[in-house]
Image: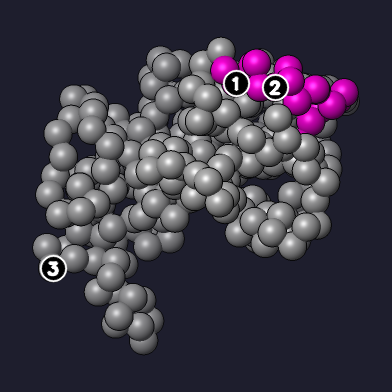
């Protein structure tokens, strides 16, 4: 079934839907469509979203355009799937910057990647899960199971994040997506969130590409809402809040994304097409 935002918005208005679940790419399409052809969405109270990064800007647009509160969920297929969730009455900072607190009977720990020890509050590490929600094993793949679930029963998600003293979890990136530039670890989520604050940018995906001098450098793939911004302007915009090494060196403007069946952007496909020379690339 193909997701069609007009049909979804019509159903919400006609059936007086009060709550819905959506991945971010779907929400972006719904917001664009609602702005072009407004419906009465007064019945919609809450949008639950997850599956990929939900930017602070998207949270604001859901409330402004779809007239709904946002609840952010975090989890994986291996955790059945939801592990944490924000509350409807959480303030905008917690909804925009975190994925909420662990669900009942679910344990979350942040562990040092090198030695698997629990790190202090507000220190980044790998997010690990233990609880009834965890899978038993990968089917007929004991090696993959052993690499994912340690001897103490902690499932290693491959996600990087940190937790505050209240138990609110912040996800900052994926281990496999981490960009290592000149020995410094950069996380795409931070760069993506900054770019999404730009009024002409609708969606963005950031990843690292090989570089002879630095090992990796940052490239930003961008889908715009109207006039294409100048690269110099984007660089200045990034530098207002990001350090030079986090500011993308290369820029690619796209009209559409390669998506998974659940609507997530396939970064590995973007990387393959970039390395194959399939994109027109601008640089600063």
Residue 71: image location, x then y, percent: 47, 31
Q: Quadrant of residue 186?
A: top left
Q: Viewer-proximal residue, 122 or 252?
A: 252
Mark 2 or 3, closer to the camera:
2
Residue 190, placed above or below residue 127: above
Q: Earlier in the sequence, mark 2 or mark 3?
A: 3
The magenta stretch is 222-239
User: Residue lying furthest bottom in this view?
Assistant: 140
- Regarding mark 2 in the picture, which secondary structure is present there? helix
Q: Residues within 10 Å of mark 1 (few under 14, many from 20)?
A: many
Mark 2 → mark 3, Cα distance in angstroms = 47 Å
Report whether residue 268 is seen. Answer: yes
Question: In the displayed structure, does residue 234 sit left or right of residue 115?
Answer: right
Residue tagged by mark 1? 238
- Regarding mark 1 in the picture, which secondary structure is present there? helix
Q: Viewer-proximal residue, 5 or 29?
A: 29
Residue tagged by mark 3? 151
Find out whether residue 232 is within the magenta segment.
yes
């Amino acid at each position: 079934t193909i997701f069609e935002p007009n049909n979804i918005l019509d159903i919400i208005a006609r059936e007086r839907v009060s709550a819905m679940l959506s991945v971010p790419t779907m929400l972006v399409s719904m917001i664009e469509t609602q702005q072009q052809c407004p419906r009465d969405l007064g019945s919609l109270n809450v949008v639950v979203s997850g599956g990929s990064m939900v930017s602070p800007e998207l949270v604001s647009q859901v409330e402004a355009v779809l007239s709904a509160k946002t609840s952010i969920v975090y989890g994986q297929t291996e955790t059945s799937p939801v592990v944490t969730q924000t509350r409807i009455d959480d303030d905008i900072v917690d909804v925009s910057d975190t994925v909420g607190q662990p669900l009942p009977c679910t344990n979350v720990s942040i562990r040092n990647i090198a030695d698997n020890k629990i790190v202090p509050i507000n220190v980044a590490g790998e997010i690990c899960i233990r609880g009834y929600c965890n899978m038993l094993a990968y089917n007929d793949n004991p090696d993959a199971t052993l690499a994912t679930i340690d001897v103490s029963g902690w499932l290693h998600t491959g996600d990087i994040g940190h937790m505050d003293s209240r138990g609110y979890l912040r996800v900052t990136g994926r281990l496999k997506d981490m960009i290592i530039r000149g020995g410094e670890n950069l996380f795409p989520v931070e760069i993506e969130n900054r770019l999404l604050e730009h009024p002409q940018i609708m969606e963005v995906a950031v990843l690292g590409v090989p570089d002879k001098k630095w090992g990796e450098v940052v490239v930003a793939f961008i889908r715009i809402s109207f006039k294409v911004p100048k690269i110099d302007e984007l660089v200045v915009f990034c530098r207002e809040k990001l350090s030079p090494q986090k500011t993308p060196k290369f820029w690619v403007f796209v009209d559409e994304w390669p998506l998974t069946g659940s609507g997530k952007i396939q970064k590995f496909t973007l990387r393959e097409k970039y390395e194959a020379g399939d994109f027109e690339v601008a640089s600063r």
